[in-house]
Image (tube, helix red, strand yellow):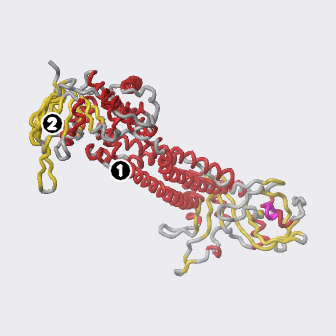
């Protein structure tokens, strides 16, 4: 029996815009167990960004309960949620969000800087391990402005791995990359999945669903589809069939 | 939270923007530098004036006639003939707090020697006068009590007189100069003293026995004044009271009657000078303080821009687990680092400016330790004060909005 990493119980999230109340999420419930690679899909306005914010402990639901690794999040203070994010969640953003003029290692070290339990040498060691894991072992001292988009996204993934999180949240992580690089990143996510990591990939691109183990589809704040993918495609196989760039 | 890490983060953020950090610091550097230089200059001037006053004799007490009224008309003190020989003798024999006392009578006129002449005045004094005024006989000797008794026609002259009457550089000792037809033999030359802080030439001086001046030149029996010196500077007040009591008794003044003499001490002069100089120093410090304030506002301005510009970075930091207080601390540390580094550079710059003024312009300069400590403290406070608001703004950002900020 695998552990429940994420448990959502009838999550609702209302926003007040002027006089009107917007219901972004209208009762969402699902459970994600350890080792799943879930894609959450939906068009814009479907509530997937709101769901991502709640899953990432950046926002709290109006009602319902969210258990992250068994810890109830809704009643937590801002500071408590910050600490929870630091220990349990790794974010990967569409636009990488690396620190400018900062080396890859320093970028990856960032989450550990906010964890007083980890000393400087331990921090360094873990950052280097994470960079090795994403295949950037030879670019540890490169600064963020000396790297390509794909390399920057790998640094961002390494940063998401470094605190050994319960779940990795990827928000349109391939959205800014060309097709070949996108598949390289997908290969990396599949590799992490095969190593037993729990990954939630939020996207509006339906192609990506085929490479994950489970698909959740949102529309107007409701889950309209939640299926387990039994026929997971290999990103590596797709990658090989892609036409090569002439520059390479 | 781990402050070493926050410190490291802040340092990194600053070193990523070296030029901007330096320009921000410049305000503080100039502010602190000018505070230190201005205060050092002000204090230097004050010290040098104090030194001049004490060179003149900080324990000097001057007694002049004055304060007399006849039929409601106040009279010119120089016409008053209230200070007589017996007053002087009473003071000389009775005062316990005095280390020296000398009558004082002056006559002005033309000094002539050969075909050189110079307008000056002859000061008739006792033998203790040179100790009271802290004058030193460089050549020859001072006249003696015997010279006073015999109203001897001798004098001791200052450097300015020597230069004007003996321009050829010949030795004045033993020469005879004439003053208003009275021949005076030069028996001593005083050491050069230069100008005092009020621009008076202290070397334009001819000393002669007071008996000579009073009998042979002025034909009077009263003094222009009496000069005395207290045993020490602290004793000046006791000595003043003592002199007042004796003179009131000698002049047979009843209780409630006004003094018919005035007692002045250098203490008053030096108090007055100190007040003026303190005012000047405060003024200079105020001007410098304003530039420090402007520097502080510069820090606030830059920190504000920095918070807006780095909104995404703040969002990222929050998403990887920085709490509001961590962000607040980071920006506060950045502001304090800027102001404290600026302060240290400012202190070094101010100190070197002081030394430059001292050795190049030969102005008196005293670097005050308190001004260094004060400006350093003000710097740190400036950093915290002006860094607080922008840091607070950064800490209160919503991570979702901050991450989406374009």
> Does residue A189 lie above or below B34 as drawn?
above
The chain letter under disc 2 is A
Q: Position of residue A118 (x, y in %)?
A: 35, 25
Asked if residue B48 lies left or right of residue A50, the reply is right
**B157 falls in the magenta region:** yes
Q: Residue at x 38, y 23 (%)?
A: A129
Q: Which residue is mark 1?
A: B308
In the rendered image, which quarter is residue A85 located in?
A: top left
Q: Position of residue B275 (x, y in %)?
A: 52, 60
Q: Position of residue B247 (x, y in %)?
A: 58, 63
Q: Which one is nearer the viewer's eye here, B55 or A65? A: A65
Q: Residue at x 51, y 51 (%)?
A: B26
Residue B235 visible in the current orientation: no
> Does residue B223 lie above or below A35 as drawn?
below
The chain letter under disc 1 is B
Q: Which one is nearer the viewer's eye here, B41 or A96? A: A96
Q: Which residues are magenta?
A: B151-161
Q: Dot 1 lies on which element?
A: helix
Residue A226 visible in the current orientation: yes
Asked if residue B155 lies left or right of residue A93, the reply is right
**A134 falls in the magenta region:** no
Task: Kindly indicate whether the residue at mark 2 contacts the one at mark 1 (C-beta within 8 angstroms).
Answer: no
Q: Which residue is mark 2?
A: A75
Q: Residue at x 71, y 58 (%)?
A: B129
Asked if residue B279 lies left or right of residue B224, the reply is left
Q: Which one is nearer the viewer's eye here, B221 or A58? A: A58
């Amino acid at each position: 029996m695998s552990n429940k990493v994420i448990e959502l119980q009838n999550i609702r999230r209302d926003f007040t815009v002027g006089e009107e109340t917007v219901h972004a999420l209208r009762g969402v419930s699902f459970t994600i167990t350890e080792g799943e690679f879930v894609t959450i899909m939906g068009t814009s306005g479907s509530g997937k960004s709101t769901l991502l914010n709640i899953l990432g402990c950046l926002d709290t639901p109006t009602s319902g309960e969210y258990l992250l690794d068994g810890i109830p999040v809704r009643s937590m203070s801002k500071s408590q949620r910050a600490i929870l994010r630091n220990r349990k969640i790794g974010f990967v953003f569409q636009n990488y969000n690396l620190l400018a003029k900062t080396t890859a290692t320093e970028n990856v070290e960032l989450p550990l800087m906010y964890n007083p339990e980890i000393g400087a040498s331990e921090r360094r060691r873990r950052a280097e391990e994470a960079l090795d894991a994403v295949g950037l072992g030879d670019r540890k001292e490169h600064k963020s402005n000396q790297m390509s988009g794909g390399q920057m996204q790998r640094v961002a993934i390494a940063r998401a791995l470094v605190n050994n999180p319960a779940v990795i949240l990827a928000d349109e992580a391939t959205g800014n990359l060309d097709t070949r690089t996108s598949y390289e990143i997908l290969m990396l996510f599949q590799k992490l999945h095969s190593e037993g990591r729990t990954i939630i990939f939020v996207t509006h691109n339906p192609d990506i669903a085929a490479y994950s183990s489970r698909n959740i589809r949102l529309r107007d704040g409701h889950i309209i589809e939640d299926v387990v993918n039994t026929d997971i495609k290999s990103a590596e196989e797709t990658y090989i069939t892609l036409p090569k760039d002439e520059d390479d | 939270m781990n402050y070493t890490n926050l410190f490291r983060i802040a340092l990194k953020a600053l070193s990523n923007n070296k030029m901007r950090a330096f320009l921000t610091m410049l305000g503080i550097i100039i502010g602190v530098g000018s505070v230190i230089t201005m205060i050092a200059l002000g204090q230097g001037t004050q010290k040098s004036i104090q030194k001049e006053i004490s060179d003149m004799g900080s324990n000097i007490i001057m007694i002049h006639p004055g304060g007399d009224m006849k039929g409601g008309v106040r009279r010119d003190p120089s016409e008053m003939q209230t200070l007589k020989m017996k007053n002087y003798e009473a003071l000389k024999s009775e005062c316990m707090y005095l280390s020296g006392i000398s009558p004082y009578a002056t006559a002005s006129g033309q000094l002539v020697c050969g075909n050189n002449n110079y307008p000056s005045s002859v000061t008739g004094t006792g033998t203790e006068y040179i100790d009271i005024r802290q004058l030193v006989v460089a050549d020859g000797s001072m006249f003696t009590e015997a010279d006073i008794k015999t109203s001897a026609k001798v004098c001791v002259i200052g450097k300015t007189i020597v230069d004007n009457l003996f321009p050829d550089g010949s030795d004045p000792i033993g020469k005879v100069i004439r003053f208003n037809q009275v021949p005076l033999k030069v028996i001593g030359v005083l050491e050069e003293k230069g100008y005092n802080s009020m621009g008076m030439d202290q070397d334009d001086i001819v000393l002669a026995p007071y008996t000579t001046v009073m009998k042979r030149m002025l034909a009077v029996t009263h003094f222009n004044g009496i000069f005395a010196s207290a045993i020490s500077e602290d004793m000046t007040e006791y000595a003043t009271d003592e002199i007042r009591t004796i003179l009131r008794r000698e002049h047979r003044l009843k209780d409630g009657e006004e003094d018919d003499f005035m007692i002045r001490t250098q203490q008053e002069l030096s108090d007055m000078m100190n007040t003026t100089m303190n005012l000047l120093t405060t003024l200079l410090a105020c001007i410098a303080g304003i530039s420090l304030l402007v520097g502080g506002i510069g820090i606030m301005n830059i920190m504000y821009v920095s918070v807006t510009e780095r909104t995404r970075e703040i969002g990222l930091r929050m998403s990887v687990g920085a709490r509001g207080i961590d962000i607040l601390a980071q920006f506060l540390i950045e502001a304090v680092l800027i102001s404290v580094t600026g302060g240290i550079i400012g202190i070094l710059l101010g100190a070197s400016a002081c030394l430059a003024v001292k050795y190049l312009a030969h102005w008196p300069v005293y670097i005050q330790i308190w001004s260094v400590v004060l400006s350093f403290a003000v710097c740190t406070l400036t950093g915290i004060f002006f860094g607080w608001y922008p840091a607070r703004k950064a800490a209160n950002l919503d991570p979702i909005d901050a991450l989406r900020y374009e």
